[in-house]
Amino acid sequence: MTLRGLLTLSCGIVLALAGAQHAPAQEPFHVTSLLSVTIGSARSTAARALGQGGYELAGGEYVDFAPWYDATSPDVTVLLLRRMSQELGLIWGVSTGERAQKHRIEPGLHLGVAWRRPISAIGAVSVTAVVPFFGRLRERACSADYGAIGGVQRVNCRLAASELPPEETLRYLLDLKGIEDARLTLRLSWQF
């Protein structure tokens, strides 16, 4: 399935579930609403940062890292909020993931909670926590030809021209789990 197909399917499922309640006599607390649509993630930013720089081959040709980490379609996250009571809500959603020549972010599922309590007539405190499941970012290795010195070997693409032995460069491939993008937010608000 293509990334566009996965995004269409994910959004279709999310919108179908969000619009599932049409009964007019339903309680106002059991409402699902769109919380956010985000393009990119901390994992996307980390992958793009790998695209800075380059190196020169033995023949003098410059190799730029940027095209290797430029995703054709960025990671898109859709979050929804289902209000469970006056103070508590359930946050859930999906992310599409992204692909580039040298990295991949898998699609993810996001779950969380939102809690809000008034502390005065004009103030409130709120806490939200959102944890992405799946959505792992993995950087891919390359094959580099070291000629008569070492032959063709598997290597971290960014470190192929470094002084490190090829097998040691593999330890520096980026590998981030989706849960590393978990967020906890504490907010104090006052109306004036």
Image (cartoon, helix red, strand yellow):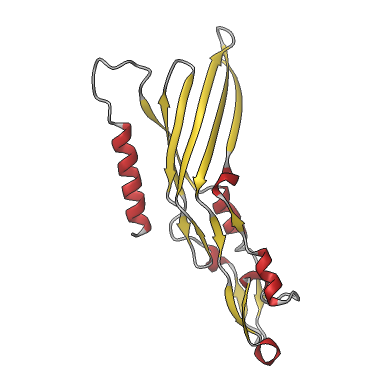
The quadrant the N terminus occupies is bottom left
Residue 23, x across and y down, in percent: 23, 21
* Left or right of residue 143: residue 25: left
* Left or right of residue 138: residue 90: left
The quadrant the C terminus occupies is top right
- Residue 169: image quadrant is bottom right
Up-down relation of residue 91 to residue 124 (above or below) = below
Residue 21, x across and y down, in percent: 27, 26
* Left or right of residue 169: residue 81: left
Residue extending furthest toward the top: 121
Up-down relation of residue 108 to residue 122 (above or below) = below
Residue 177, x across and y down, in percent: 57, 51
The residue lying at 53 percent from left, 39 percent from top is 131
Up-down relation of residue 51 to residue 144 (above or below) = above
Up-down relation of residue 68 to residue 49 (above or below) = below
Residue extending furthest toward the bottom: 148
The residue lying at 71 percent from left, 89 percent from top is 149
Between residue 34 and residue 30, name the one nearer to us: 30
The residue lying at 32 percent from left, 55 percent from top is 5
Between residue 35 and residue 149, name the one nearer to us: 149
Residue 109, x across and y down, in percent: 45, 43
- Residue 19: image quadrant is top left
The mark total stands at 0
